[in-house]
Amino acid sequence: YLRTIALTKFQGFSCQMIASFPYSFSFFYTYESVRALMGKSHAGNVMASVCAEIVANLVRNPFEVVKQQMMVGRSDRIW
């Protein structure tokens, strides 16, 4: 019984760990690229943050859907 509880607490954790690298990479790569183009002004930092968040969320969203499906136990219907 305790093992079942422990395993259900970590459903979706593997997907989250796999998704963290592409999300972080896409965010920081986009942020630094846009910031280099826009300059290191306040407006450049804001625009770089906005662009980076949009790109990173495009990468993260499919992983979030899979993680949520795994957490509710519907991982057989993901694909």
Image (spheres, helix red, strand yellow):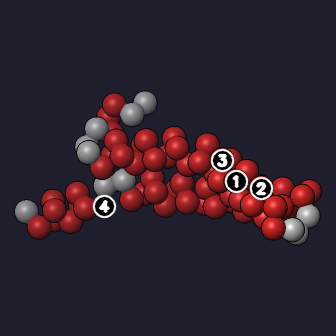
Residue 31 visible within the image: no
Disc 2: which residue: 47
| Residue shown at 71% from the left, 59% from the top | 49
Amino acid type, mark 3:
Ile
Is tag 4's residue or tag 3's residue first in the polypeptide sequence? 4
User: Given contact means CB atoms under 8 Å apart, are the residues at marks 3 and 1 in contact?
Assistant: yes
Locate residue 10 relative to residue 64 in the image: left or right.
Answer: left
According to the image, label 3 marks what residue? 54
Mark 4 or mark 2, which is nearer the start of the sequence?
Answer: 4
Marked residue nearer the N-terminal end (1 or 4): 4
Secondary element under disc 3, as helix, strand or loop, is helix
> In the picture, which quadrant includes the N terminus?
bottom left
Q: Report x, y in % for residue 66.
A: 42, 43
Mark 2 or 4, which is nearer the eye?
2
Element marked by disc 2: helix
Q: Earlier in the sequence, mark 3 or mark 2?
A: 2
Q: Residues within 10 Å of mark 2 (few under 14, many from 20)?
A: some
Which of the 4 image quadrants contains residue 20?
Answer: bottom right
Q: CA distance from mark 1 to mark 2?
A: 5 Å
Residue where numbered disc 1 is placed: 50
Q: Amino acid at mark 2?
A: Met
Q: Which residue is mark 4?
A: 10
**Residue 69 x, y percent position in the rendering:** 34, 41
Q: CA distance from mark 4 to mark 3?
A: 28 Å
* Amino acid carrying mark 1 in the image: Val
Of helix, strand and loop, which one carries label 4?
loop
